[in-house]
Structures are given as C-alpha cells and as structure tokens.
Amino acid sequence: MKLFRDSKGSFILILLVLIVASAVAYLPLIGKIGYSNDDWYLMYDAHVAGPQIFHAVYSIDRPARAYVLIPLYSLFGENTILYHFNLYLFHVLAALALFWALDMTWPRRRFFTFGAALLFLIYPGFLSQPNPVDYQSQIISLILGMFSIALTIKAIQTSRMVPKAIIAVASVLCGITYLSLVEYFIGFEVLRFMLIVVVMLRNTQLWRKRLTAILRTWSPFLIAPAAFLFWRLFFFQNERRATNVGAQVGELFASPIYKGLDWLIALFQGTIKIIFLAWAVPFHDLALQLRLRDMLVGLALAVFIILIVAISSLSLMRSGEGDQESTYDWRKEAWLVGLPSVVGGLLPIVVSNRQADFGGYSRYTLTGAAGGVIVLMVLLSYLQSARVRMGLFSLLAGIAILTHYANSVNAVTSSESIRNFWWQVFWRAPQLKSGTTLAVDYPQAGIAEDYFVWGPASFIYSPEKQITIPISIRLSGIVLDQDNVLHILASHGQTTPEGRGFVSTQNPANVTVIAQASSEGCVRIIDGSNPELSSGDAQDIMLIAPHSHIENVVLDKQASTPPVAVFGNEPPHNWCYYFEKAELARQRGDWHTVDKLGDEALNQGFYPADRIEWMPFLQSYVVLGELDKTHHLVSIIDSDSFTKLQACQILSHTRPKNGPLSADMQNLVQQSFCQ
C-alpha cells in the first residue's frame, strides 16, 4: 500500500473507494428500474409535446429545472438507464466536492474527510435515487451546492487577487444556480458560513477582529442566497403553495406559540433522524424485510464494501493523519460545522411545514446529510482504538450498502409490477374511450397521484403528438382516497384541474375499475353490471366495482404496442395472457374463442393463481353446454365461498344466444354453485 502513502496517492485511493462503493450502492439493479411517481407525467409530457414543454411544467415554481431536463431528454430520450447512470455520476461528483471542501479545511485529517465524503455519498436516509428522471434536478443542485461551498474555501485560501476573484465569482454563480433548482437546499448556506467561521477563527486572536474578518469574508458569498431570495420573494410569481414562503411562514403569525413549538420539536426530531436514525430505520424497514435470496446478495455486496473500506481506512491511518493542527482543536471545529449544518439544513424544511422522513420525503434528509456525517465522524474520532474506529466506520458503510440494495430491490419489484400490470391491460383492452377515468389498484405500488395511473395508460392508449400546451389528457386517473370513493359512489364531483403542463378531467360518473389482487394474479377490468371480485381485492375496489363502466373498452380499435423503453419487452404468454384474451373474447360474446383459449392455457400447464380467474371459462362452459368441463370446476369454485357466491349470481343470469340453458346445465348450476 506504499502507493497510497503520499497525499496524491491517498486521493487516488479515496477516489477509487468512492466510485466503487457508490457503484455497488446504486448501480447493480438500474437496468430493471423503470419510471416511478412524477417521472410518469414528466416523460409523457415530453413524449407527446417535446422537451420544450418542461418550461410550462416548471414555470409555476422552479423554472430553472427546465434547463436541466430539456438537454437531458434531448440526449437520453426515454432510455431510463441513462438517467440512472447520470444520477450516479453526479452524486459521486457532489461527494467529491464535499471532500474537497473538508480537505481544504482540515488538510491533514484525510480519514475524517474521506469518511464524511463516503458516508455522504451512500447516505442511507436518502432513498429517492431510484427515481431516475424527477431527481436529476435535486442531484445536480446538490453537486452545484457542494462545489459552491468548496470554491468558497478555495477562494479564501487563495492569496492572488485575480484567481481569488475568479474563484469567488464561480462560487457565487454555482450558489445562485443550485438554489434556483432546489430552493430548500438553502440550508447549505449554514455549512458554507460555518466553514468560513472555522477558517477565519484560526487567523486572529481578538474576538472583535475575528467577527469583522468573518463578516468581511462571508459577505461576497452572501450574494448568492441574497440575490436568489430577492428574486424569489419580490419578482417571481409563485403559483404553488407548497413552495410559497409567504404562505408557509404566515402560519407562524396565525399561531406563534403553537407553531413555534411545533417547529422546534420538528427540528429536534429531524436532527436525530438525520444523524442517527438514518442508519437504523431504513435498514430495519427495507433490508431486514428482504427475501433470503436478495438478503444473501445484499450481504455479499455489503461485506465486499466493508472489506474495501476497512483496508483503505487502514491505509489512510498508516499514511499519517498527522497532527499539524496542534494550534487548534479540529474536533471542536468539526462540531461547530456539523451540528449547525444539520439544524440549518432542516430549518427551510420545517418552516415549509414539512418533515424529513424515510419514505416519500426522504429527499429532505439531503439538506442536513453533510452536517450529519461530519458529526458521526467526529463521534468516531473519540474512540481510542483505531481498529474499533475503523470497524464501526466500515460497518456504517456496510449498513448503507445493504439498505440501498434493499431499496433498489423494492424499486425493481414495483417497476416490474407496474410494467406487467399495463401489459396485461394492453392484452385485455384494445383501446379505451376518450374521457374515461381509470380507478386502479396496483398490487405492489402505491398510487399517490392521478398521473401514476394515467401516465402509463396514456403511453399506450394516447401516444399521439400534441402541439397545444397545456396538453390534454385523454384518459384520466383517480386516487382512491375517501373523498373520491364517495364521489364515485354518488357519480358526481367532476373536476378539471390543471397540472404541470397538462389538463386532466376526472369524471367519477364515468369510471372504469381495473384491479389486480396480487402480483401473481391477473389484471381484471371490472364489469359493473356483473362485477367479478377476488377475495384479495382492496375494499375500495369492492365498493366501487358496481360503478365500473366496461363499455369504455373499445373492441374495434387497437392501441399501439407499449414502448419497450417504458414498459420493457412483452412478458411471456402465461396464464394471464390467455385470461386477458378470454376476457376480451367474452366481452365480444365469442364463447367458442373463450373455450379454445382455456384449453390452450391448460394444455400448456398454466393455471390461475386466483379462483375468480376461472369465471370467463366457467361461463363459456355453461353457455356452450359443456357439462363435463363445468363439473370439473365445481370442486375448485366450491372451496371459496366468496367466488362460489359470485358464480351463482353470474351463471344464474347467463343465457346463450340460441335460447335458455339446458335443464341439465340449469340443475348443475343450481346444485353446485347456488346451494
């Protein structure tokens, strides 16, 4: 390890470890992770209207983001893996920028600065890395923020005026740009200020001179947040309440004592989350829930990184951290930087009446993550044993790797579930009528916004180019919360809200319900006149099933094949393929095709995972008078009372085109399914 004993060699080692560790954390499964959450409307908007629509998308709150996604979409198109790799690359650069800033501040504490950079890079509290498109702006803002801070330290330490001015201007420009992309990252300014304080406190002894020197040094770099806030508050017309400073702070004046205490508690809780709980809660919620096979793979990756981190840490320690800073207490300085940076990073989040968590708001943990890892590394430095210090640091890295792998596994499961869902819908529904509102239940993915539904549906059923902005969404979606379920039951409550670059009309009186009880089961488009429900269906689906309009499925037109870049290759034609085609044939009244499809599926060894999936075939047997085939399903249907009840109701009203059921078939239906 002599190669890494000098300063240049140790930097190469640090760079290699950062690249390898982050690659193991973020890259193993990116080829299987598709669009999620806000990616759906962003990519559909661009798909039908071109990348220039991003100006309309972000005009209401963060217009600078358009200048990130327009070139990226022009380069990457809808190729998901390129967005994933770009996120990874810029995340590495952000960590390098933080390392540079800390290394300039504590140049002989390479283990400390390396450790902070590594833990920042693979920080397990941030779980939104698998969002390939929407989080481009956040990570680019992160790198610009960290580089702005690093350039500030470089400018302070540069003595020649011209280079000093150029570096300072670059720092200010990076500062304005990162804030224009993600305004709540303004908490990074606390990290910048505290690093300035630490550097300047070393240069003079008198407190009055220290304060003057700090303010004089800080003032040029205050231009970035000051200019941004001046523009944001006095010139920009913010149309979104969640990012409107006046609307959020106004709540404090409405109830100062209650809201003030609420904010203080949130700051304390958030600080504990960012420094400590980020290494425990996501690990418990994600990694410990893995299946055995995935757990073994994740453990192998974690052990691999633990070994690499341990060996590299040992090399850095042996290279001599040195104690040149004997004139000042670096640990005290690190505390002075770390803890205020966590609180300062959280403050904009808390004032916006949001809280950092390890779910949908994990992005808010990034604001204080740099300060949090500095605090952790300072705490480790108090351990007397270098081996124990190295071991705990390596263990933290291993926990982060296993957590991120588990997070990626969940993202893959969700992506594959959604892709499989819409392939089955495509097999089942040749086309859907314009104006249809889709009420959907995914088996392994939540639906927080309506575009989680109409986004993928529109890629298949409405891919036509549009020139008018905002674009018109031909198929809408509806989130099955309590209010919307009531609107569907009452068949009223139509709304036409304008979203980011699109207009979508939700019509609860014209809902088509699409359900999938489990990932193993098949997708079912519910016929409200004869709803067929699985015992595993969500209660909301059961409630609104009678209001589902099956006639919104157009039988004489065919949608284009789902784009591979979005939905992957067409899945193998297993039981669900034959089920969907049988459902389509049943809707057309083609009972012989239903019968034929059932025989083909069974001959290939395919069987349903849910008893309700026998219904189209059972009904075809009854219509066609096939007593033997009907009798074969009696024991299967009889084993589930819920399915048996539905079979009785549906088959009792089934009539062939050429007349009533035969007496033998009527007796079989009554005795086998209705008693």
Image: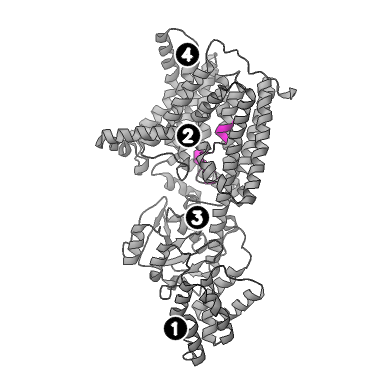
Query: How many neighbours does mark 2 have within 10 angstroms: few (below 14), some (14-19), or many (20 or more)?
Result: many
Q: Which mark is residue 274?
A: 2
Which mark is in front, 2 or 4? 2
Mark 1 highlights which residue? Answer: 652
Residue 422 location (% of width, % of height):
53, 62
Mark 3 highlights which residue? Answer: 445
Q: In the rendered structure, does residue 126 fall within the stretch colored magenta?
A: yes
Q: In the rendered structure, does residue 179 fall within the stretch colored magenta?
A: no
Which mark is in front, 3 or 4? 3
Q: Using residue 320 as the reference point, say whether residue 576 is left or right of it.
A: left
Query: How many neighbours does mark 1 have within 10 angstroms: few (below 14), some (14-19), or many (20 or more)?
Result: some
The amino acid marked with disc number 1 is Ser
Q: Using residue 147 as the reference point, say whether residue 320 is left or right of it.
A: right
The amino acid marked with disc number 2 is Ile
User: Mark 4 falls on what kind of element?
Assistant: helix
Q: In the rendered structure, are the residues bearing label 1 and label 4 in contact, judged by CB atoms less than 8 Å apart? A: no
